Image (cartoon, helix red, strand yellow):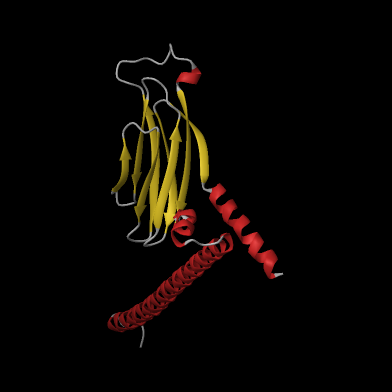
């Protein structure tokens, strides 16, 4: 049973890496962006491959939610970008192909106005080069797989710890909000009751002054 588990987890790793690979068509004068949510102190890499069309360049831009540029390439064709996050954030990878100034699209065929973009984004454990690690430390294939599974387990534990922390923060926020709503409700009820009592006393004095009641 243990052997079956060890043989299944590498397959899951491959599925995770495959899911991060995306391909799409990018027409001229169109901007398409991909967003990725990453934890703090996490290594992120991206391998991209863009169809080359004469006279048409594609701009690649990677930014975080604060607008900081993490990677920028004016004429992107094929390459890689890498960076390490300083805090939990959502970064955005944008591709844009613009027609050169003064050039018209009516004389271009559809094959010359659309580029195919392929990008494979990895982060965390996926960015680690286990082949280089095996060569440097002269590890056997089984030892490499064990190191991979150990790193994957550590990443899963870290994700669960982060989820638990977020759950605790949300719970504290909900409890704080509930307390504030409760106190505000009590304060509102006290104000309404005080106003009602004041109105009764005021009207009673008024009617007594007018000798409408004893």
Query: Can the viewer see residue 212 in this picture?
Result: no
The structure residue drawn at horizontal position 30% and vertical position 15%, both measured from the top left corner, is: 102
Residue that extends furthest to the bottom in the rendered view of this protein: 214
Residue at horizontal 47%, vertical 56%? 135
Asked whether residue 48 is in view, the answer is: yes
Of 124 and 200, nearer the camera is: 124
Question: Is 160 situated above or below 199?
Answer: above
Q: Nearer the viewer, residue 21 or 160?
A: 21
Give the left or right position of residue 144, taking residue 44 as reference. Answer: right
Q: Position of residue 173 (x, y in %)?
A: 41, 72
Quadrant where the N terminus sits is bottom right
Please state, as top left, top right, bottom left or bottom right, where the C terminus lies in the image: bottom left
Provide residue 14's location: percent of width, then percent of height. 58, 52
> Quarter-wise, where is residue 54 in the image?
top left
Give the answer, above or below, for where 154 lies relative to 210. Answer: above
Left or right, 7 with respect to 84, comes to: right
Q: Residue at x 60, y 58 (%)?
A: 10
């Amino acid at each position: 049973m243990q052997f079956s588990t060890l043989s299944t987890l590498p397959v899951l790793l491959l599925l995770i890496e495959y899911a991060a690979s995306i391909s799409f068509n990018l027409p001229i004068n169109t901007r398409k962006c991909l967003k990725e949510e990453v934890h703090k102190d996490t290594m992120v890499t991206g391998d991209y491959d863009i169809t080359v069309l004469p006279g048409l360049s594609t701009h690649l831009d990677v930014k975080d939610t604060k607008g900081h540029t993490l990677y920028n390439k004016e004429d992107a064709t094929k390459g890689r970008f890498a960076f390490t996050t300083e805090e939990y954030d959502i970064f955005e990878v944008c591709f844009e192909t613009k027609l050169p100034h003064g050039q018209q699209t009516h004389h271009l065929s559809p094959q010359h106005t659309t580029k195919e973009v392929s990008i494979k984004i990895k982060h965390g454990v996926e960015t680690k080069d286990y082949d280089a690690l095996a060569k440097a430390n002269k590890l056997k294939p089984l030892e490499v797989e064990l190191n991979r599974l150990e790193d994957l387990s550590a990443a899963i534990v870290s994700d669960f710890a982060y989820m638990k922390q977020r759950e605790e923060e949300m719970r504290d926020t909900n409890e704080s909000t509930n307390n504030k709503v409760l106190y505000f409700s009590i304060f509102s009820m006290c104000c309404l009751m005080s106003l009602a009592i004041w109105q009764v006393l005021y009207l009673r004095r008024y009617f007594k002054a007018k000798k409408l009641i004893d």
